[in-house]
Image (spheres, rainbow, N blue to C red):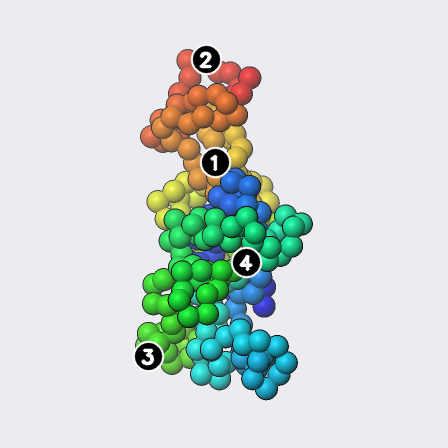
Amino acid sequence: MREINQLHPMLRKKLKEMYAVCKEQGLPIGIGECLRTVEEQNKLYAKGRTEPGRIVTKAKGTTYSSMHQWGVAFDFYRNDGRGAYEDGDGFFAKVGQVGKKCGLEWGGDWKSIVDKPHFQLPDWGSTPSVLKSKYGTPERFIRTWPAGGWRFDGKGWQHRRGDGNDTKSDWELIDGCWYWFDQQGYAVEKTWVSYKGNWYYLGVCGKMATGRQTIDGKLYHFLEGGEMETSSPIKPGA
């Protein structure tokens, strides 16, 4: 499955950050498989064994042995028209470094079946052993996930609060960072926002800028609350 919204809320957050940074660095990626069913995992496991092809996984679906089945892993591919898995220029290692800086475990670091297009949350180790011991099945684990969180609908990122409502035309403090959501509920990125007489800038990942920032070649200073420091009411960038 390629439904980002079926991933663990924390993984959705880190995926959002990684995706934005990759775009900023000229490393366009697409998101491949996310949560996998038992049937989907068993089909992959059969390759090179009972079905044609080469072995691509050691994880059998019926034993819940893939992190994909637990909703804490996703795969990515190259999305710049040069071939989904073309790696002559070290593309996947570059993306791997970005993901690691965002707090993800990269399959390219593995020694057994190196998996360069793979990322996962490191919170429960590299294998599902801890998850299986604590929760038994992915269904029980998923029921413990916090409500709400980041969601992607193919157009942009939205955030559902714990009360079940999306933030719209307002600020939201999420994991210690401020974000601005437009009238449709999408987090804005690399955009200026005028709010109550002050200018704010939402940078990569949509996080509110603070301190000194160079934007479009110009230097700006933002106060701790995010307001642009200025002695005259000019529009930023003018």
Q: Distance between the residues labelled 4 and 3?
A: 28 Å
Q: Which of 55 and 38 is in front in this view?
A: 55
Give 111 or 205, whichever is nearer the viewer: 111
Q: Nearer the viewer, mark 3 or mark 2?
A: 3
First reached walking from the N terminus: tag 4 or tag 3: 4
The answer to whether mark 4 and mark 1 are in CB contact below 8 A is: no
What's under tag 2, amino acid-wise?
A: Ser
Q: Where is residue 133 in the image (x, y as percent from the top left)?
A: 33, 79
User: As rendered, which of 123 and 150 lies closer to the eye?
Assistant: 123
Residue type highlighted by circle 4: Phe
The residue that mark 3 highlights is 133
The C terminus lies in which quarter of the figure?
top right
Considering only vertical position in the picture, is 152 above or below 68?
Answer: above
Mark sitting on residue 203: 1
What distance separates the C-alpha of mark 3 from that of mark 2?
61 Å
Q: Residues within 10 Å of mark 3 (few under 14, many from 20)?
A: few
Q: Which residue bears the numbered disc 2?
A: 232
Q: Residue furthest top?
A: 232
- The nearer-to-camera label among 1 and 2 is 1
Q: How many labels does the image show?
A: 4
Work out how far the residue at label 4 is from the one at label 1, CA to CA, in angstroms.
23 Å
Relative side of 190 to 220, left or right: right
Disc on res. 57? none
